[in-house]
Amino acid sequence: MPKIAVIPGDGIGPEVMREALRVLDVIAQKNSISLEFEELPLGAAHYLETGEVLSDETIERLEEKDAVLLGALGDPRVKPGVLEKGILLRLRFHFDQFVNLRPVLLYDGIPSALAGDMRDISMRFVRENTEDFYVGLGGRVSQGASRSELVLKRKAYEAKFDIGIDLTGDEELAYQIGVITRQGARRVLDYAFTLAKAKGIGLVTSVDKANVLTEMYGLWREEVADASTRHGIASEFQYVDAVALHMIKNPKRFKLLVTPNLFGDILTDLGAALQGGLGFAPSGNINPEGVSMFEPVHGSAPDIAGLGLANPVGAILSSALMLDTLGHGKAAAWIESAVQEVLRGGEHKTPDIGGTTSTSQMGDAIVETLNQTSP
Ligand code: NAD
Ligand code: IPM
Ligand code: MN
């Protein structure tokens, strides 16, 4: 029996999670999959009450699970990064969830941010999820800085770039370093090319900024070329700025994009706009051999929290992605069809796409459709 940890989290997290769990309940009943849930009260409320972000003991509990379902984290009362890095990123790193799979699919009945006939939007992002600028290496250097920091300062200075910053002076500076390892690039690229083959996609687009960040993305490119040859699937290199342009001008040219961590974060919010908005975008933090974690792409949306305005579709589709990863592909496809049917009908529209359907009414509609259909 799959054991699932549920972290509703902050803001609209608990609201969208409630609907995802209702959907999973129907699936479990009708498809006789037994799922065991344990809810963990992590997030701003727990932190403000206890001072604890995420204990080792909680991590140990999570280690016993088959998957984690997460709503969203982040709260205006808490300094940026405390919950996001302390919970979300810590879990992604701890469980070595090196793939962040983010499908960008525009379903019938949903308006895209793009006008007119550009509805052929069907791309998948495979975002590297444990390296790049997310590794957490960095600091601030001021007078009396530690020795290693001074070495860094000196190296940057010796590069003799005219960068207009006085690296030798006493003025404080902050730096943060990105890291790409060969092994880290190779494993996510292997995942991406394997997925391309499974989906019948003949071209993988690699996203980078190898014209400026030549060290990191030079190495990345070597591994892309190697993976392309090993898997026998064509690849292309695109700079991230150009990808942003093409996603708007000609989105159908992209089918599978593999990106370093930070660019993948940014481009998948852009992708969410193409698929109708953040409320429609699901994602999976995947370790193919370990505990994976599924969450909508959106955050805690404090601006609409508690008002019943949140679109739960991204969270519901994330739970489908979870079932798929746990080996219940049929049940996952069933959820996706039910969501598509409801959206195609046009009767149920959440406020993010100009409708008046509330979070729970959207859940009702999807549950009802599931009750009337079978896998
Ligand atoms: P956000 O994704 O929370 O919201 C951006 C905009 O999209 C807001 O206007 C919001 O109302 C809207 N939106 C988001 N989800 C929606 C939904 N399901 N239905 C309808 N509208 C929706 O991003 P933000 O405002 O930049 O960040 C808010 C907080 O969330 C911050 O603390 C941030 O760090 C955190 N965050 C967390 C995650 C996560 O937990 N995975 C992801 C992104 C941001
Ligand atoms: C996301 C979020 C996170 C990220 C933040 C909240 C740490 O933006 O899941 O897209 O940058 O990965
Ligand atoms: Mn993001």
Image (cartoon, rainbow, N blue to C red):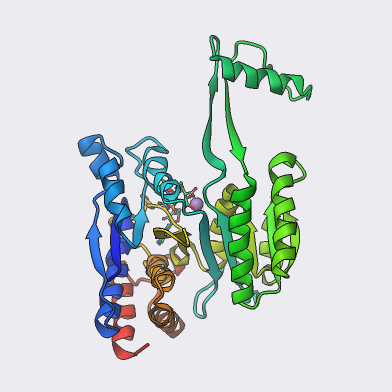
Image coordinates for residue 139, horizontal then vertical, percent: 52, 26
| Nearest to the observer: residue 341 or residue 223 | 223
Q: Is residue 115 visible?
A: no
Identify the residue shown where x is 64% and y is 74%.
197
Identify the residue shown where x is 30% and y is 84%.
31
Q: Quadrant of residue 39?
A: bottom left
- Image quadrant holding the C terminus, namely bottom left
Q: Residue furthest left?
A: 49
- Image quadrant holding the N terminus, namely bottom left
Q: Is residue 37 visible?
A: yes
Image coordinates for residue 317, horizontal then vertical, percent: 42, 70
Image coordinates for residue 239, horizontal then vertical, percent: 73, 52
Q: Is residue 325 left or right of residue 253?
A: left
Residue 281 higher or lower than 42, as above or below: below
Q: Is residue 186 left or right of residue 31?
A: right
| Nearest to the observer: residue 71 or residue 195 | 195
Identify the residue shown where x is 32% and y is 84%.
370
Image coordinates for residue 235, horizontal then vertical, percent: 74, 64
| Nearest to the observer: residue 225 or residue 70 | 225
Q: How many labels were placed on the picture?
A: 0
